[in-house]
Image: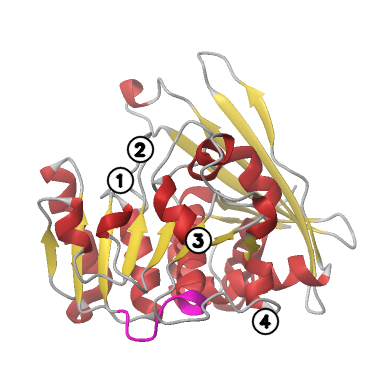
């Protein structure tokens, strides 16, 4: 029997603190050799669609699980009234080859993307950081805020985005997510206004040009840049990166996809990848990134498969415990 977990099931099975714990497990496993992860495979689909296949193996003392996330990006879907992206995660018992679960991947991806920012913020941001400048008000934005708020309770959120409708929907979503704990939310008139006094920055856009300039960044700021995931995209300007301590989810993945880093690297504006620290080194204590209160830190994430198998495994285990989901013969 294999368990099917819908989006609603995953939402019931996974809290943000649990997702952050899963990210800590995933990146620790990468450093200790308990995680195996080939680079993602890209297959072109009809009508300019793309299928991404992201395999990974997690072999801790508690579990031996293989995961495969499939992400379909179909540009014509919105015109059909369908989501742009469909995703699912297949979990397999690595010891027996038995299919354990098929998990809806949309919410799962948003949770793990938020959670890795939460983990990076916990490890890198100043303890007194409590004002967030948020760039973007799309799908990823609410869970970025939720994750950051989980590890650094926020006093204020300042949003920079293009659409007033998206901003208003973001406010509603955040108030539902955070309840009475939701801090004041404002829509800033400019990047410089949002960054004034903010020690936390979250970038969750598909921008192709930098969202702000180094001159507006406060000393001691921590920046999570998770939106730009192709070589042509860019959220953080070269001067900020040149002054910052850079942490990536994985160097190999960053060198393939992180436009923020690849573009200034090609122009000689930032130092090469040997100076970039992998998050797994920070998680395991091998590299303390913040050495001074005024250091600026940047976590650049493009998303890696080990995150998906870790968080899907946690949701699956919780579903078994709570009796959530539907079992089928496969």
Q: In terms of secondary structure, where does tag 1 sit?
A: loop
Residue tagged 3? 299
Residue 60 in the figure: left or right of residue 142: right
CA separation in Å, label 3 and label 1: 15 Å
Marked residue nearer the N-terminal end (3 or 1): 1
Q: Which residue is drawn at 53% across and 45% down?
A: 261
Label 4 and label 2: CA atoms lie apart by 33 Å
Gap between marks 2 and 3 measured at Cα: 17 Å
Residue sticking out furthest to the top: 47
For the question of whether residue 69 can be seen, the reply is: no
Mark 4 element type? loop
For mark 2, does the 10 Å Cα neighbourhood hold few (<14), some (14 to 19), or many (20 or more) residues? some
Q: List the residue tagged with mark 4.
A: 285
Q: In which quarter of the image is residue 323?
A: bottom right
Image mark for residue 207: 2
Cα–Cα gap, marks 4 and 1? 31 Å
Marks 3 and 4 sit apart, C-alpha to C-alpha, by: 16 Å
Residue 128, percent from left and from top = 32, 85
The magenta segment is: 122-129
- Residue at the spot 52% in from the left edge and 73% down from the top edge: 20
Residue behind mark 1: 211
Give the percent coordinates (x, y) of residue 24: 61, 74
């Amino acid at each position: 029997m294999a368990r099917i977990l819908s989006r609603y099931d995953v939402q019931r099975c996974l809290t943000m603190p649990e997702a952050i714990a899963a990210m800590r497990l995933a990146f620790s496993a990468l450093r200790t050799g308990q995680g195996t992860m080939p680079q993602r495979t890209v297959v072109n689909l009809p009508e300019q669609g793309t299928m991404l296949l992201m395999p990974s193996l997690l072999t801790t003392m508690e579990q031996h699980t293989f995961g495969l996330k499939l992400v379909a990006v179909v540009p014509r879907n919105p015109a059909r009234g369908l989501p742009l992206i469909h995703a699912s995660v297949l979990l397999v018992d690595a010891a027996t080859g038995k299919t354990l679960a098929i998990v809806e991947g949309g919410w799962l991806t948003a949770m793990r993307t938020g959670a890795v920012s939460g983990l990076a913020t916990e490890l890198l941001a100043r303890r007194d950081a409590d004002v967030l400048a948020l760039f973007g008000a799309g799908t990823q934005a609410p869970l970025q805020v939720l994750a950051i708020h989980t590890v650094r309770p926020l006093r204020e959120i300042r949003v920079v985005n293009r659409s007033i409708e998206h901003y208003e929907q973001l406010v509603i979503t955040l108030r539902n997510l955070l309840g009475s704990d939701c801090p004041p939310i404002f829509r800033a008139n400019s990047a410089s206004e949002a960054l004034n006094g903010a020690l936390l920055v979250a970038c969750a856009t598909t921008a192709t040009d930098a969202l702000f300039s180094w001159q507006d960044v406060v000393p001691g700021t921590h920046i999570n840049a998770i939106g730009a995931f192709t070589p042509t995209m860019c959220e953080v300007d070269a001067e900020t990166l040149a002054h910052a301590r850079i942490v990536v989810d994985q160097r190999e993945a960053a060198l393939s996809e992180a436009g923020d880093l690849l573009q200034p690297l090609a122009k000689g504006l930032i130092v090469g990848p040997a100076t970039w620290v992998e998050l797994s080194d920070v998680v395991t204590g091998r590299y303390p990134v913040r050495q001074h209160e005024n250091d600026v830190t940047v976590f650049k994430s493009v998303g890696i498969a080990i995150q998906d198998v870790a968080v899907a495994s946690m949701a699956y285990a919780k579903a078994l415990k709570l009796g959530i989901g539907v079992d089928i013969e496969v």
